[in-house]
Image (tube, rainbow, N blue to C red):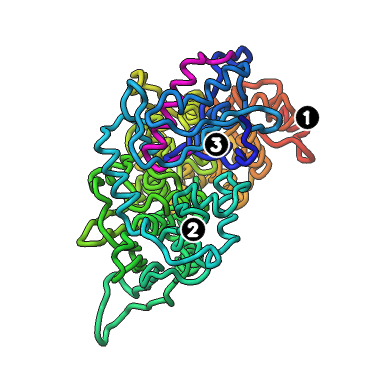
């Protein structure tokens, strides 16, 4: 049965989570794909539909690969019909059947699952439950208790006195589009998201719908956000009062979040932060981290508490986001701090619509990423504190970069590394090791991409693999460790930069002896040729560890152009490279390519051999044989 009302487009790039999953209907190697077993497809579809129905609803899309590519299916019509009917034939109570949708001429299977009012059983195989991006088994009593609390007893489920005429139709259209349900009417969308109930020929709205879509302020005394700025690190009172309160932010929840984003963004300072391998001006807290803290406070607060609301306190050294109410029943602080994905939502209707609107990540994804974003910005882990009738999330802005970290960054310089590759190396330096899971946590890469990145660094001899099956990990290679150790020894002698992001000259090994009087074999050159021009020195400082061949050769050519005749030993000292490797790997090929000329071309191993850039100043025959 085709469903022209459902638009799959928003889901092709969506990350799997609490309300969405995708599965391929094919198996086998690339170029030789075949249809998956039909019975297994029906079983899997029924299991996922039950899991979504036992949680807050969701979408199961079949015919899409993990990377988002659309591959469709190879089933005959009768097998498709049996698959669509699986929620009716394999679940108790039966759930709505699936439907087919077309994308670029490819047929897909979609199960758009509403939240069920009672526990749903997979016949003969228990009660599946969706938790984050996983499907787990749960007890019937556990599911029933969660539904009773979240779907019937919460403040958001109560009846609203508003009518559809009081709602922002543009905001409703935005929510429908984000959910892939643009073809539905506003009333149909509200009913599907359990924001309204059918009562004969009319619908009765719930409080959640009012909070989300009211054109005017919802009937709640503290549904908005209050923003405070504190001059200092502690609040003071009386004559030393140091708190500035911004105007209250009120309206529907999407309006409140939009305005809060604008207000707080304008208050944040922009210190120099390490981004990739460079220090740049960045907001003092990562955008995703503080916004996620705010979104969670708004989405999961207890709206039955009307005497206080959501507050944001900006101190000199930290940001505190305060949410009214404690943690939802069944959720512990220990689970949150362990970054476990738990399924307990005080306001499941609000959360689902904020996901449709793009404000919230699927439940369970946002908090781990908030912690990862803070780590990625070299800031302390977020702190979560549960007090009487409130939860406080604290983000601190003091960098966790150590002197050792700064020296490591300086030594890498302008190495040809992507931001993720740099993070992998820095993690190996800071922790002594890096593995696939740890890298995924701070980069957002999937398992395959993280594995490919780590193998690439191993192939470039930057990481060493320690194969342990599922517990495999990587460490810095001895060469990289020695390179860093040299840097730290130089720091002990005061020869390194101040850690501002680039290595100082001494960090490159240009010690006074290297740059004072010229060696005997270069005595014919003027003494003022011993210094390198500033632009060439910058090129050296930006090379980093293990630079690409072409970048290194460009710098060698620049050195020889600036200094005239230069020995391989002198070039090696400037670059802190191995003289033995430099000659065979770079100097000889550059001579053959016409980029350099030898002082003694007829005797490549001459003890006073030197090199100069080719061009107008190329040596004469007389110079060759002096």
Q: Secondary structure at mark 3?
A: helix
Residue drawn 66% across the image and 33% down it? 103
Give the mark count: 3
Q: Within the magenta stretch, is there residue 54?
A: yes
Quarter of the figure that contains the C terminus:
top right
Q: Residues within 10 Å of mark 3 (few under 14, many from 20)?
A: some
- Point out the stretch of residues depicted in magenta: 34-58
Q: Which labelled disc corresponds to residue 282?
A: 2
Give percent across and percent down for residue 478: 39, 27
Q: CA distance from mark 1 to mark 3?
A: 24 Å
- Examine the rendering and report whether any part of residue 565 can be seen: no
Give percent across and percent down for residue 395: 34, 57
Q: Which labelled disc corresponds to residue 570?
A: 3
The residue under label 1 is 621
Q: Residues within 10 Å of mark 2 (few under 14, many from 20)?
A: some
Give percent across and percent down for residue 538: 58, 49
């Amino acid at each position: 049965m085709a469903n022209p009302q459902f638009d799959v487009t928003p889901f092709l790039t969506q990350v799997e989570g609490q309300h969405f999953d995708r599965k391929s209907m094919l198996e086998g190697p690339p170029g030789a794909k075949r249809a998956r077993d039909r019975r297994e497809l029906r079983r899997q579809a029924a299991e996922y539909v039950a899991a979504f129905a036992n949680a807050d609803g969701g979408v199961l899309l079949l015919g899409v690969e993990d990377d988002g590519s659309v591959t469709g299916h190879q089933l005959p019509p009768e097998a498709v019909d049996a698959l669509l009917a699986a929620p009716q034939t394999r679940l108790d109570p039966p759930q709505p059947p699936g439907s087919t949708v077309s994308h670029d001429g490819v047929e897909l299977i979609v199960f758009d699952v509403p939240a069920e009012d009672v526990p749903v059983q997979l016949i003969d195989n228990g009660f599946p439950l969706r938790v984050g991006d996983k499907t787990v088994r749960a007890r019937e009593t556990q599911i029933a208790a969660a539904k009773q609390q979240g779907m019937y007893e919460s403040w958001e489920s109560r009846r609203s006195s508003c009518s559809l005429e009081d709602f922002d139709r543009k905001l409703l259209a935005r929510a429908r589009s984000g959910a892939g349900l643009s073809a539905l009417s506003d009333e149909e969308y509200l009913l599907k998201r359990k924001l309204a109930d059918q009562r004969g020929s009319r619908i009765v709205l719930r409080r959640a719908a009012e909070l989300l879509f009211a054109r005017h302020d919802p009937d709640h005394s503290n549904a908005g956000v209050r923003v405070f700025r504190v001059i200092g690190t502690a609040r003071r009172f009386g004559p030393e009062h140091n708190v500035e309160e911004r105007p209250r932010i009120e309206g529907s929840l999407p309006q409140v979040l939009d305005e809060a984003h604008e207000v707080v963004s304008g208050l944040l300072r922009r210190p120099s932060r390490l981004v990739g391998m460079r220090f740049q001006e960045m907001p003092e807290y990562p955008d995703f981290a503080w916004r996620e803290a705010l979104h969670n406070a708004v989405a999961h607060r207890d709206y039955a508490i009307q005497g206080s609301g959501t507050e944001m306190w900006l101190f000199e050294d930290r940001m505190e986001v305060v949410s009214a109410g404690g943690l939802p029943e069944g959720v512990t602080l220990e689970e949150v701090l362990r970054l476990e994905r738990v399924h307990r939502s005080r306001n499941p209707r609000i959360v689902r619509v904020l996901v449709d609107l793009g404000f919230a990540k699927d439940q369970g994804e946002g908090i781990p990423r908030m912690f990862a974003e803070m780590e990625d910005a070299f800031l302390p882990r977020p702190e979560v504190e549960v007090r009487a009738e409130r939860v406080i999330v604290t983000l601190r802005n003091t960098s966790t970069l150590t002197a050792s970290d700064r020296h490591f960054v300086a030594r890498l310089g302008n190495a040809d590394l992507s931001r993720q590759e740099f993070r992998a190396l820095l993690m190996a330096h800071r922790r002594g090791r890096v593995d696939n899971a740890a890298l995924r946590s701070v980069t957002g890469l999937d398992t395959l991409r993280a594995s490919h990145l780590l193998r690439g660094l191993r192939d470039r001899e930057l990481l060493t693999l320690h194969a342990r099956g599922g517990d495999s990990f990587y460490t810095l290679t001895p060469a990289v460790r020695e390179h860093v150790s040299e840097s730290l020894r130089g720091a002990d002698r005061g020869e390194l930069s101040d850690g501002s992001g680039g290595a100082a000259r001494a960090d490159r090994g240009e010690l006074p002896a290297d740059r004072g009087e010229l060696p005997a074999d270069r005595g014919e050159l003027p003494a003022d040729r011993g210094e390198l021009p500033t632009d060439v020195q910058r090129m050296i400082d930006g090379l980093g560890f293990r630079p690409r061949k072409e970048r290194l050769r460009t710098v060698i050519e620049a050195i020889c152009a600036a200094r005239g005749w230069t020995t391989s030993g002198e070039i090696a000292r400037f670059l802190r490279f191995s003289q033995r490797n430099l000659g065979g790997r770079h100097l000889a090929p550059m001579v053959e390519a016409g980029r350099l000329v030898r002082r003694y071309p007829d005797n490549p191993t001459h003890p006073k051999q030197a090199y100069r850039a080719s061009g107008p100043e190329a040596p004469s025959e007389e110079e060759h044989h002096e």
